[in-house]
Image (cartoon, helix red, strand yellow):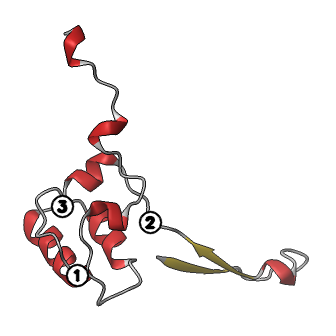
């Protein structure tokens, strides 16, 4: 998502170098957001994932994140292709023998 902010110059106010700023907001993922794609039809394209997210009632942030993916025709095999830091079951140190 890209926002362009234009500041108006006031008399004796904002310097010209600050007039036009470009702020780029990158997508962010959380476990809660990523879990809304658990039952997605993997492998899938960007458009298929957006369609699934819309139909399944995923949070708006998920749809925005998917729209920010650069490759339209790329096939994504799993959430790890979209969010490489997605924690796997091995990332949780759960010792079943203790409980």
The numbered mark, 3 or 2, whose residue comes first in the sequence reads: 2
Give the camera-side residue of 16 and 79.
79
Q: Which residue is mark 1?
A: 45
Which residue is at 19% across, 10% downward? 99
Give the class, few, some or many, for how many residues have Cα within 10 Å of label 1's Cα (few <14, many ≥20): some
Q: Secondary structure at mark 2?
A: loop
Q: Which residue is mark 3?
A: 58
The quadrant where residue 59 appears: bottom left
Q: Secondary structure at mark 1?
A: loop
Give the class, few, some or many, for how many residues have Cα within 10 Å of label 3's Cα (few <14, many ≥20): some
Which residue is at 8% across, 70% downward? 55
The numbered mark, 1 or 2, whose residue comes first in the sequence reads: 2
Residue 77 rendering spot, x and y as whole percentages: 24, 70
Q: Nearer the viewer, mark 1 or mark 2?
A: 1
Q: Which residue is mark 2?
A: 27
On screen, residue 38 above or below 73: above
Q: Residue furthest front?
A: 97
Give the class, few, some or many, for how many residues have Cα within 10 Å of label 2's Cα (few <14, many ≥20): some
On screen, residue 86 above or below 96: below
Give the camera-side residue of 39 and 36.
39
Is 49 displayed left or right of 14 in the figure? left
The numbered mark, 1 or 3, whose residue comes first in the sequence reads: 1
Residue 85 rendering spot, x and y as whole percentages: 42, 53
Q: Residue furthest top?
A: 98
């Amino acid at each position: 998502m890209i926002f362009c902010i234009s500041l108006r110059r006031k008399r004796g106010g904002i310097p010209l170098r600050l007039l036009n700023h470009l702020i780029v907001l990158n997508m962010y993922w959380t476990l809660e957001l990523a879990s809304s794609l658990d039952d997605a039809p993997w492998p899938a394209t960007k458009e298929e994932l957006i369609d699934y997210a819309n139909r399944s009632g995923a949070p708006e942030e998920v749809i925005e994140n998917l729209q920010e993916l650069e490759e339209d025709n790329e096939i994504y095999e799993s959430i790890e292709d979209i969010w490489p830091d997605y924690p796997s079951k091995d990332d949780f140190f759960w010792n079943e023998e203790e409980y």
